[in-house]
Amino acid sequence: MDQKKKRNDRFINSVIRITGYSSILFVLLILFFLLREGLPALASTPLKTLLSVRWYPIEGYFGIIPLILGSILVTVVATLIALPFGIGAAVYLSEVAPPWIRDILKPIIEILAGIPSVVLGFIGILVFVPFIRKFLDIPTGLTAFTGAVLLGLISIPTIVSVAEDALNTVPNSYRQASLALGATRWQTIWDVTLPAAKSGVLTAVMLGIGRSMGETMAVMMVTGNAATMPVRLNSLFTPIRTMTATIASEMGEVAAGSQHYQVLFLIGIVLFLLSLVINIFASLASTKSRQRSERLLS
Amino acid sequence: MDYMRRFLVILIILILAAGCTPRSTAGETAIQQNEYIENKGSDTIVNLALAWAEKYQQVNPGVRISVTGGGSGTGITALINKTVDIANASRQIKPEELEEAKSAGLSPQEFVIARDAIAVIVNPANPVDHLTLDQLSKIYSGEINNWSEVGGEDRPIVRLSRETNSGTHVYFLESVVRKGNAEDPTIFAADTLLLPSSEGIIAEVRDNPNAIGYDGLGYITSEVKVLGISSPGQPDNFVIPSAETVTSNEYLISRNLYMYTQNQPTGAIKEYLDWIFTPEAQEIVRELGFVPVQNR
């Protein structure tokens, strides 16, 4: 009997280990595939072409700068929109709301996270796009701003969900100690609970940013996909084209191995690097804050 | 991410489907003699050709038609190499291609199987009713940026286009933006909105009085206004696209869609081409947004 239990144990252990390692393997395989398909673009396309400001692949214009800037603009603005709402909602759910409200709101937010982005994109086209055009009196509602608002909506549930879990793991004794010292509820939230949950909240924000950066369908439907350089002050309210929308709309028709195909994979590499940079910053920030709190406690 | 996931699902379905089909066809061949038609070429026609092939195989289970895209040039090259029976092309065969075919011992036969017309559309609230080809070209290349320059209100022009991978986009580029001049390097203005679907273009034109768009005639709904277009030869003669004006060649932005066979068609290929000109097959042409042709 004991022998059998041990064997079972070992078996399950190895299964779990394999699934763990496999995730590393998959990332490496994806990276390898991306590099293999995308790096030849650097050989086939002059750097001057790649760094130009015009993207019109069927005539050999392969300037990826407007696409990179378009993605960054939309992601940054989406994060600025999602951050206050996401963190605020998480704090409300975890620190302020009475339990029965939390029991209603939490599942609703989780349902929100599950709405397919194409559905949100459709709502965006029918509701947001005409509204933003009329409200701001701009030539068209298919703009970077529309995309950013939608992306904000898409990433808020992710941020709320993860940040709320992080706040919940803060021991109750922290809050009680703070309140006992005479701090107000707000002071407790701002100076004690949030800093204590910092690494988890930061992870939530990074996941939200990642979600915005990688989102494709909704962005493709509402940003207009015009590969302009978003460098003027009003660029937020003009159409832009993101990297993800470009890959999604052009990859289907392109001949495998052609120059256009390689450049699309190169864009994929750029996306990969950008999310890598975000992740590195996130883990740096969270380890740094952990080290600091460990120092304080010791 | 979502796109990739969808792609994977489709891929898996295709793999499963591919796993199933050969067995059933093998069963069929055992029962009856199978005729096999290879059909390849223009991406503009590929959906139409697929719909025809599907319908025809329902009516005639003994015939199998394989349809692939790749472009008009690819199709005609394959025809010359005798690897396909019918080539689809959204342009006429070039003289040098014809020479090549003749030296390969073929005499390609041409069939106009449908016509394709592109309507230029604006919001119903826009007072502009018509444009010359020159004005249209200047609007899309970014030279004209305000409706007041073409007789409308003082509003910015929002240019809408299909994505660059669509055959309609390429045709519009060649015949309108470049006005049919192949040497012309003009391209769409950088701030042209590239929308992924016909529905996206119709929706934006319907809502936005600043917008101008174009799309295949069959996709146009009554919620948008179709502009009359005049040719450079007769700048005052504005023609609204319709089945009649397209058939009579009065409407400028329209073209023939072709099928080419290696020689005078015989047997199953001839029967298939004959069927294509029946009202039943031409109804599919209308459903897919092209303009039907009467007879050969």
Image (tube, coloured by chain):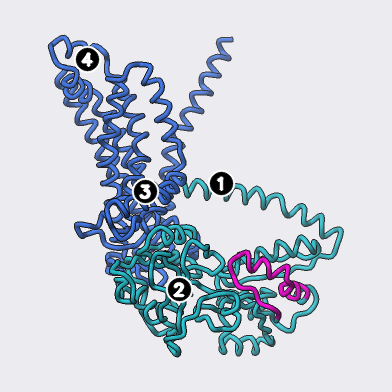
Chain colours: A blue, B cyan
Q: Give the range drawn in magenta.
A: B271-295
Residue pointed to by mark 2 = B227
Q: Which amino acid does label 4 sit on?
A: Arg
User: In the rendered image, which residue does mark 3 sit on?
Assistant: A128
Quick one: quadrant of the C terminus of chain A?
A: top left
Left or right: residue A129 compared with residue B291: left
Query: Mark 2 or mark 1: which comes first in sequence?
Result: 1
**Mark 1, chain letter?**
B
Mark 2 vs mark 1: give the one in front: 2
The spot of residue B273 in percent (x, y) is 73, 75
- Residue B78 in sight in this render: yes
Query: How far apart, in angstroms, are the residues tagged by discs 4 and 2?
Result: 68 Å
Is residue A101 highlighted in magenta? Answer: no
Q: Nearer the viewer, mark 4 or mark 2?
A: 2
- Does dot 2 land on a helix, a strand or a loop? loop
Question: Which image quadrant is residue B145 in?
Answer: bottom left
In percent of width and height, residue B158 lies at 34, 65
Residue A251 seen in render: no
Read off the residue under disc 1. Answer: B9
